Image (cartoon, rainbow, N blue to C red):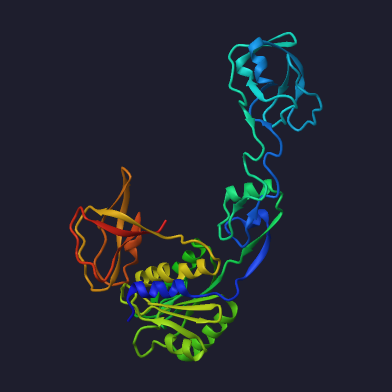
Amino acid sequence: MLHFDESIKMLKDLKIDHYKTKKLYLMDALGYVLAQDIIADHNSPEFPTSAMDGYALKHEDMATRRLKIGSINPAGSALKEEVHHGSCIKTFTGSLMPKGADTLIPIENVSVEGDEIVIKQTVPKGFSVREVGENYAQGQLLIPKGTKIGFVEIGVMASLNIISVLVYEKPTVAILSTGSELLELGQMQTNHAQIRSSNNYILEALVKKYDGIAMQLGCIRDDKQSITVALAEAIKKSDIVVTTGGVSVGDFDFVKEVIRELGCEVVFKGVRIKPGQHIMVARKGDKFIVGLPGFAYSSTVTALLYVVPLIEKLQQGKSSLRLVKATLSQPFVKRAKKAEFTACNIALEDGTYRVDFDRKKVGTSAILTNMLGSTALVFTSEEDSSKAAGEQVEVLLLD
């Protein structure tokens, strides 16, 4: 079995030959990843502009303390009048600065007497004047390719009059749970050996959360023919196929065998990790197949570690998950000579992450309820040992 670090490196080193892209109307592109650089085609502002309501004037004229109001300059108007010595023009936020003016004095700094202003408090030269290119300059790279589009990116692109934008398609992730013992939601139980399937629903929610398009294909019986037909169809229809169960070493674990028979190249099979050591990643061209273990906690953790990065890779996106340093409030017991991901409670106190294990059960990799609450995952490598309260550990944040 591979060292965990080696498996992650292999995943990062996977090359995509052809990325899927499409043009979307600007507002429909929210949440997608840019497949083009956004470069300014003009200066913003293109001309000196007022940043406040006030009076545009020549700075040297403030010494006179009294100036004649020449005209009014509303935002959006094409004012042709100029500011001459001894005069000013009433100018509003967003208006172009009149020719001849180099300073804007705010309304609050003057009083109006008839057709004149009386200056009560002076301001520095250039006050409240937005210079050409203050926001951005023509030719400037504003948003690089690979950026996830949020509300700020939408606003910047709208200011550039970008109606539609090129984005990476969100990968379609087909989800299959294998196991003759599994019951779908609402399906009646006929014997005590049957269990309710949760993995396929966990994975559907996880795919949606981390910017994939989930294709729910339900539960498949543990026979080779059913798995072969389901997997072959899933590979045709999706970019990533995720299976749960069937990758271990039991008599009915057919997934790993079928993946090879369908002409897929196995990237790796088996990692020294707890939970999820039987994880399998394969590819067929630019499509990927990830075989996850069957236990709920195990499949959830390995999906975070191996499926989420593939969703991001197919969009050239940045990692949604990150490791941070945290301080143990309780001792940590190292239970296996493998990389371990252990559910913990996490809180941010005075700028420091702190973790404990209150109400977290010790048992098999089936205890999904350990992930309820404000949960993160303590990461320890196979080289680590148990740790005392007060020591620092690495923690994988889920949000």
Image height of 106 relative to 12, above or below:
above
Side of 270 where 154 appears, left or right: right
Side of 364 where 121 appears, left or right: right
Q: Quadrant of the C terminus?
A: bottom left
> Percent position (x, y) of residue 275?
32, 72
- Residue farthest right in this picture: 80
Query: What residue is shown at x 27% (from left), y 61% (from top)?
Result: 360
Number of on-image labels: 0
> Percent position (x, y) of residue 16?
55, 74
Q: Which quadrant holds residue 117?
A: top right
Q: Is residue 264 in sight in this rendering?
A: yes
- Residue farthest front in this picture: 60
Side of 383 where 322 appears, left or right: right
Side of 49 where 339 appears, left or right: left
> Percent position (x, y) of residue 159?
68, 45
Q: Which quadrant holds residue 380?
A: bottom left
Camera-side residue of 83 and 231: 83
Query: What residue is shown at x 71% (from left), y 28% (from top)?
Result: 97
Q: Is residue 198 in sight in this rendering?
A: no
> Percent position (x, y) of residue 155?
63, 47
Image height of 248 relative to 336, above or below:
below
Image height of 195 relative to 29, above or below:
below
Query: What residue is shown at x 63% (from left), y 60% (from top)?
Result: 36
